[in-house]
Amino acid sequence: AQSVTQPDIHITVSEGASLELRCNYSYGATPYLFWYVQSPGQGLQLLLKYFSGDTLVQGIKGFEAEFKRSQSSFNLRKPSVHWSDAAEYFCAVGAPAGNAGNMLTFGGGTRLMVKP
Amino acid sequence: DAGVTQSPTHLIKTRGQHVTLRCSPISGHKSVSWYQQVLGQGPQFIFQYYEKEERGRGNFPDRFSARQFPNYSSELNVNALLLGDSALYLCASSIGTSGLLWDTQYFGPGTRLTVL
Protein backbone atom coordinates (compact mmCIF):
# COMPACT_ATOMS: atom_id res chain seq x y z
CA ALA A 1 0.00 0.00 0.00
CA GLN A 2 1.13 3.52 -0.69
CA SER A 3 2.10 6.01 2.00
CA VAL A 4 3.37 9.56 2.35
CA THR A 5 5.53 10.98 5.12
CA GLN A 6 6.02 14.64 5.84
CA PRO A 7 8.76 14.66 8.50
CA ASP A 8 8.27 18.25 9.63
CA ILE A 9 5.04 18.94 11.50
CA HIS A 10 5.80 22.64 11.98
CA ILE A 11 8.21 24.97 10.20
CA THR A 12 8.80 28.66 10.91
CA VAL A 13 10.61 30.89 8.42
CA SER A 14 11.16 34.61 8.18
CA GLU A 15 9.41 36.55 5.46
CA GLY A 16 11.68 36.75 2.42
CA ALA A 17 13.63 33.62 3.36
CA SER A 18 13.68 30.49 1.25
CA LEU A 19 11.53 27.48 2.05
CA GLU A 20 11.78 23.74 1.57
CA LEU A 21 9.08 21.33 2.75
CA ARG A 22 9.99 17.67 2.73
CA CYS A 23 7.88 14.82 1.39
CA ASN A 24 8.79 11.14 1.14
CA TYR A 25 6.53 8.59 -0.47
CA SER A 26 6.27 4.83 -0.70
CA TYR A 27 4.67 3.41 -3.82
CA GLY A 28 5.45 0.36 -5.91
CA ALA A 29 4.92 1.88 -9.35
CA THR A 30 5.55 5.21 -11.03
CA PRO A 31 4.19 7.75 -8.58
CA TYR A 32 1.77 10.53 -9.37
CA LEU A 33 2.53 13.25 -6.83
CA PHE A 34 0.73 16.37 -5.69
CA TRP A 35 1.16 19.28 -3.31
CA TYR A 36 -1.92 20.97 -1.88
CA VAL A 37 -2.20 23.97 0.46
CA GLN A 38 -4.92 24.49 3.06
CA SER A 39 -5.59 27.81 4.76
CA PRO A 40 -7.38 27.73 8.13
CA GLY A 41 -10.97 26.56 7.79
CA GLN A 42 -10.63 26.13 4.04
CA GLY A 43 -10.49 23.30 1.55
CA LEU A 44 -7.40 22.19 -0.33
CA GLN A 45 -5.92 24.17 -3.21
CA LEU A 46 -3.69 22.41 -5.73
CA LEU A 47 -0.21 23.94 -5.91
CA LEU A 48 1.41 21.59 -8.42
CA LYS A 49 1.53 18.02 -9.66
CA TYR A 50 3.99 15.56 -11.14
CA PHE A 51 2.89 12.88 -13.56
CA SER A 52 5.94 12.31 -15.76
CA GLY A 53 8.65 14.11 -17.71
CA ASP A 54 10.73 16.93 -16.27
CA THR A 55 11.44 16.18 -12.62
CA LEU A 56 11.32 19.86 -11.66
CA VAL A 57 7.73 21.09 -11.79
CA GLN A 58 6.50 24.62 -11.44
CA GLY A 59 3.29 25.51 -9.67
CA ILE A 60 1.21 28.47 -8.67
CA LYS A 61 2.25 31.21 -6.24
CA GLY A 62 5.95 30.78 -7.09
CA PHE A 63 6.24 27.24 -5.75
CA GLU A 64 8.23 24.44 -7.37
CA ALA A 65 8.90 20.82 -6.48
CA GLU A 66 11.54 18.32 -7.51
CA PHE A 67 10.87 14.61 -7.95
CA LYS A 68 13.82 12.42 -6.97
CA ARG A 69 13.09 8.77 -7.63
CA SER A 70 16.31 7.53 -5.98
CA GLN A 71 15.31 9.24 -2.73
CA SER A 72 11.54 8.66 -3.04
CA SER A 73 11.11 12.35 -2.40
CA PHE A 74 9.06 15.22 -3.78
CA ASN A 75 10.14 18.30 -1.85
CA LEU A 76 8.38 21.63 -2.23
CA ARG A 77 10.41 24.83 -2.50
CA LYS A 78 9.94 28.56 -2.73
CA PRO A 79 12.81 31.04 -3.04
CA SER A 80 11.20 33.87 -1.05
CA VAL A 81 8.32 33.33 1.36
CA HIS A 82 5.53 35.86 1.77
CA TRP A 83 3.41 36.27 4.91
CA SER A 84 0.39 35.05 2.94
CA ASP A 85 2.09 31.65 2.49
CA ALA A 86 1.38 30.77 6.13
CA ALA A 87 -0.87 27.69 5.89
CA GLU A 88 -0.82 23.90 6.07
CA TYR A 89 0.82 22.04 3.21
CA PHE A 90 -0.04 18.48 2.20
CA CYS A 91 1.86 16.14 -0.06
CA ALA A 92 -0.14 13.34 -1.69
CA VAL A 93 0.40 10.34 -3.95
CA GLY A 94 -2.25 9.12 -6.40
CA ALA A 95 -2.99 5.43 -6.72
CA PRO A 96 -5.66 3.13 -8.16
CA ALA A 97 -8.68 2.42 -6.01
CA GLY A 98 -11.27 -0.30 -6.39
CA ASN A 99 -13.22 -0.40 -9.63
CA ALA A 100 -10.91 1.56 -11.95
CA GLY A 101 -11.02 4.54 -9.64
CA ASN A 102 -8.23 6.60 -8.20
CA MET A 103 -7.52 7.92 -4.74
CA LEU A 104 -5.13 10.30 -3.07
CA THR A 105 -3.11 9.25 -0.03
CA PHE A 106 -2.00 12.26 1.97
CA GLY A 107 0.82 12.90 4.37
CA GLY A 108 0.12 14.33 7.80
CA GLY A 109 0.84 17.87 6.67
CA THR A 110 3.38 20.58 7.52
CA ARG A 111 2.19 23.78 9.17
CA LEU A 112 4.14 26.77 7.90
CA MET A 113 4.42 29.88 10.02
CA VAL A 114 5.99 33.07 8.64
CA LYS A 115 7.73 35.58 10.90
CA PRO A 116 7.64 39.25 9.87
CA ASP B 1 -16.60 29.35 -13.17
CA ALA B 2 -17.80 28.08 -9.81
CA GLY B 3 -15.58 25.61 -8.03
CA VAL B 4 -16.70 22.60 -6.04
CA THR B 5 -19.50 23.57 -3.67
CA GLN B 6 -20.52 21.79 -0.50
CA SER B 7 -23.42 22.15 1.89
CA PRO B 8 -23.93 22.73 4.69
CA THR B 9 -20.83 24.58 5.84
CA HIS B 10 -21.16 23.50 9.44
CA LEU B 11 -23.30 20.88 11.14
CA ILE B 12 -23.79 19.78 14.73
CA LYS B 13 -25.29 16.38 15.48
CA THR B 14 -25.57 14.09 18.48
CA ARG B 15 -24.36 10.53 18.78
CA GLY B 16 -26.58 7.99 17.04
CA GLN B 17 -28.07 10.48 14.58
CA HIS B 18 -27.80 10.37 10.82
CA VAL B 19 -26.27 13.05 8.58
CA THR B 20 -26.33 13.85 4.85
CA LEU B 21 -23.66 16.01 3.25
CA ARG B 22 -23.96 17.38 -0.27
CA CYS B 23 -21.49 18.22 -3.02
CA SER B 24 -21.76 19.80 -6.46
CA PRO B 25 -18.76 19.27 -8.75
CA ILE B 26 -17.14 21.75 -11.07
CA SER B 27 -19.18 22.13 -14.25
CA GLY B 28 -18.10 19.45 -16.73
CA HIS B 29 -16.60 17.18 -14.09
CA LYS B 30 -18.11 13.71 -13.90
CA SER B 31 -16.29 12.21 -10.92
CA VAL B 32 -16.72 13.03 -7.23
CA SER B 33 -14.61 11.81 -4.32
CA TRP B 34 -15.14 12.17 -0.58
CA TYR B 35 -12.44 12.54 2.07
CA GLN B 36 -12.52 12.79 5.86
CA GLN B 37 -10.04 15.11 7.58
CA VAL B 38 -9.79 14.73 11.33
CA LEU B 39 -8.28 17.73 13.11
CA GLY B 40 -4.51 17.73 12.86
CA GLN B 41 -4.32 15.00 10.21
CA GLY B 42 -4.25 14.70 6.46
CA PRO B 43 -7.43 13.83 4.55
CA GLN B 44 -8.41 10.16 4.24
CA PHE B 45 -10.18 8.73 1.20
CA ILE B 46 -13.75 7.52 1.73
CA PHE B 47 -15.38 7.06 -1.70
CA GLN B 48 -15.10 7.85 -5.37
CA TYR B 49 -18.05 7.91 -7.77
CA TYR B 50 -18.05 8.22 -11.54
CA GLU B 51 -21.12 8.14 -13.74
CA LYS B 52 -23.20 7.15 -10.69
CA GLU B 53 -21.08 4.06 -10.02
CA GLU B 54 -18.85 3.52 -7.02
CA ARG B 55 -15.29 3.32 -8.32
CA GLY B 56 -13.36 3.22 -5.07
CA ARG B 57 -13.91 2.82 -1.36
CA GLY B 58 -11.55 3.53 1.51
CA ASN B 59 -11.28 1.77 4.85
CA PHE B 60 -14.47 3.10 6.42
CA PRO B 61 -17.34 1.17 8.07
CA ASP B 62 -20.64 0.45 6.37
CA ARG B 63 -22.19 3.32 8.31
CA PHE B 64 -20.73 5.47 5.55
CA SER B 65 -22.48 5.44 2.19
CA ALA B 66 -22.71 7.71 -0.81
CA ARG B 67 -24.40 8.12 -4.13
CA GLN B 68 -24.07 10.22 -7.26
CA PHE B 69 -26.95 11.73 -9.16
CA PRO B 70 -27.50 12.14 -12.94
CA ASN B 71 -26.32 15.76 -12.71
CA TYR B 72 -23.05 14.43 -11.13
CA SER B 73 -23.73 15.93 -7.71
CA SER B 74 -23.23 13.62 -4.78
CA GLU B 75 -24.37 12.90 -1.25
CA LEU B 76 -22.41 11.35 1.60
CA ASN B 77 -24.49 9.70 4.30
CA VAL B 78 -23.29 8.66 7.73
CA ASN B 79 -25.54 6.62 10.03
CA ALA B 80 -25.32 6.03 13.77
CA LEU B 81 -22.89 8.89 14.31
CA LEU B 82 -20.01 8.44 16.72
CA LEU B 83 -17.94 11.09 18.45
CA GLY B 84 -15.02 10.01 16.26
CA ASP B 85 -16.92 11.03 13.12
CA SER B 86 -16.31 14.67 14.01
CA ALA B 87 -14.20 15.98 11.16
CA LEU B 88 -14.01 18.16 8.08
CA TYR B 89 -15.58 16.29 5.16
CA LEU B 90 -14.08 17.28 1.84
CA CYS B 91 -15.50 16.69 -1.59
CA ALA B 92 -13.28 16.69 -4.67
CA SER B 93 -14.24 16.59 -8.32
CA SER B 94 -12.29 15.55 -11.40
CA ILE B 95 -13.02 15.54 -15.12
CA GLY B 96 -13.11 11.77 -15.58
CA THR B 97 -13.57 11.94 -19.34
CA SER B 98 -10.06 10.70 -20.10
CA GLY B 99 -10.29 7.92 -17.56
CA LEU B 100 -10.14 8.26 -13.84
CA LEU B 101 -6.56 7.29 -13.32
CA TRP B 102 -4.43 10.33 -12.63
CA ASP B 103 -7.25 12.82 -13.03
CA THR B 104 -6.42 15.86 -10.96
CA GLN B 105 -8.82 16.29 -8.05
CA TYR B 106 -10.09 19.76 -7.10
CA PHE B 107 -11.42 20.22 -3.60
CA GLY B 108 -14.36 22.09 -2.15
CA PRO B 109 -14.28 24.08 1.11
CA GLY B 110 -15.61 21.17 3.16
CA THR B 111 -18.38 20.58 5.69
CA ARG B 112 -17.38 20.77 9.34
CA LEU B 113 -19.28 18.06 11.25
CA THR B 114 -19.32 18.11 15.04
CA VAL B 115 -20.81 15.13 16.88
CA LEU B 116 -21.74 15.74 20.53
Image (cartoon, coloured by chain):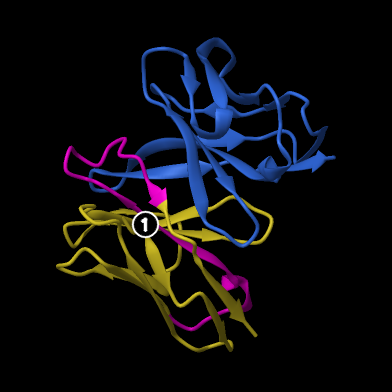
Chain colours: A blue, B yellow
Residue B86: x %, y % from top left: 60, 72
The magenta stretch is B79-106
Q: Nearer the viewer, residue A71 or A41?
A: A41
What residue is shown at x 41% (from left), y 12% (from top)? A54
Q: Quadrant of the C terminus of chain B?
A: bottom right
Q: At x 26% / y 67%, what residue is drawn?
A: B73
Along the horizontal axis of the image, is B68 left or right of A71?
left
Confirm whether residue A46 shows in the render. Answer: yes
Residue shown at 37%/59% (left/top)?
B4
Q: Is residue B94 magenta?
A: yes
Out of A70 and A68, give the one closest to the viewer: A68
Quadrant position of residue B75: bottom left
The crowd level at tag 1 (other Cα within 10 Å; few <14, some 14-19, many 20+) is some
Element marked by disc 1 = loop
Asked if A107 appears above or below B3 in the picture, the reply is above
Q: Which residue is mark 1?
A: B3
Q: Where in the figure is residue B21, as x and y percent of width and height?
A: 41, 75
Q: Position of residue A40 (x, y in %)?
A: 65, 58
Please give left or right for residue A74 compared with residue B99 in the image: right
Residue at the spot 44% in from the left edge and 30% down from the top edge: A49
Q: To which quarter of the image does residue B65 belong?
A: bottom left
Say which chain tag 1 marks.
B
Classify residue A8 as left or right of residue B53: right
Lateral position of residue B116 relative to residue A55, left or right: right
